[in-house]
Image (spheres, grey):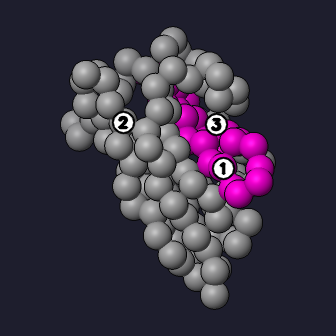
């Protein structure tokens, strides 16, 4: 059974760091596109970052460029999102999702399987 499980969220002060994990089971991450999305209260879900299948090309939303890094550990079948210099506006539920094919997408509707989400709160 195909499953994605996020972990690593929590409460952090502005300027702090967190590393989110997205562990896959039932399929091999390397063959699929994995995206990180987030949804803040009262806002639409938005794409944060994405890593393409095979080549591992990465894409970032402008709001997180230079602060977030997406990576993939094929041996652990896990994708990570390293988040540095966190801001209060980064507060949201973060989801990872899987998309078939080779290329990243910013559209959540292109992703077919989703994790349950992990809460990230940036506050002093």
**On the rendered image, what quadrant is the C terminus found in?**
bottom right
Q: Residue furthest top?
A: 101
Q: Is residue 1 visible?
A: yes
Res 74 quadrant in image: top left
**Which tag, 2 or 3, sits closer to the chain's start?**
2
The segment highlighted magenta reads 33-57
C-alpha separation, residue under disc 1 versus residue under disc 3: 18 Å
Q: Tag 2, which secondary structure? A: strand
Query: In x, y percent, where is residue 48?
Result: 65, 45
Whether residues under marks 2 and 3 lie with C-beta atoms below 8 angstroms apart, the answer is no
Residue that carries the numbered disc 3 in the rendered image: 59
2 in relation to 88, above or below: above
Identify the residue shown where x is 48% and y is 48%.
117
Q: Residue furthest front?
A: 42
Q: Assess whether residue 42 is covered by the magenta stretch.
A: yes
Query: In x, y percent, where is residue 12?
Result: 53, 78
Res 64 quadrant in image: bottom right
Identify the residue shown where x is 55% and y is 51%.
94
Q: Is residue 73 visible?
A: no
Q: Residue furthest bottom?
A: 124
**Which tag, 1 or 2, sits closer to the chain's start?**
2
- Residue 116 vs residue 51, the one in the foreground: 116
Q: Residues within 10 Å of mark 3 (few under 14, many from 20)?
A: many
Residue that carries the numbered disc 1 in the rendered image: 39
Left/right of residue 28 with respect to residue 8 in the rendered view: left
């Amino acid at each position: 059974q195909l499953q994605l499980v996020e972990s690593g969220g929590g409460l952090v002060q502005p300027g702090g760091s967190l590393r989110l994990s997205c562990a896959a089971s039932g399929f091999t991450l390397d063959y699929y596109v994995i995206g990180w999305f987030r949804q803040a209260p009262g806002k639409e879900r938005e794409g944060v970052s994405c890593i393409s299948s095979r080549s591992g090309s990465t894409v970032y939303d402008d709001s997180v460029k230079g602060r977030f890094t997406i990576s993939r550990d094929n041996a652990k079948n896990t994708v990570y999102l390293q988040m540095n210099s966190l801001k209060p506006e980064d507060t949201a539920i973060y989801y990872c999702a899987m998309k078939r094919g080779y290329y990243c997408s910013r559209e959540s509707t292109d992703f077919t399987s989703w994790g349950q989400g992990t809460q990230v709160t940036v506050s002093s």
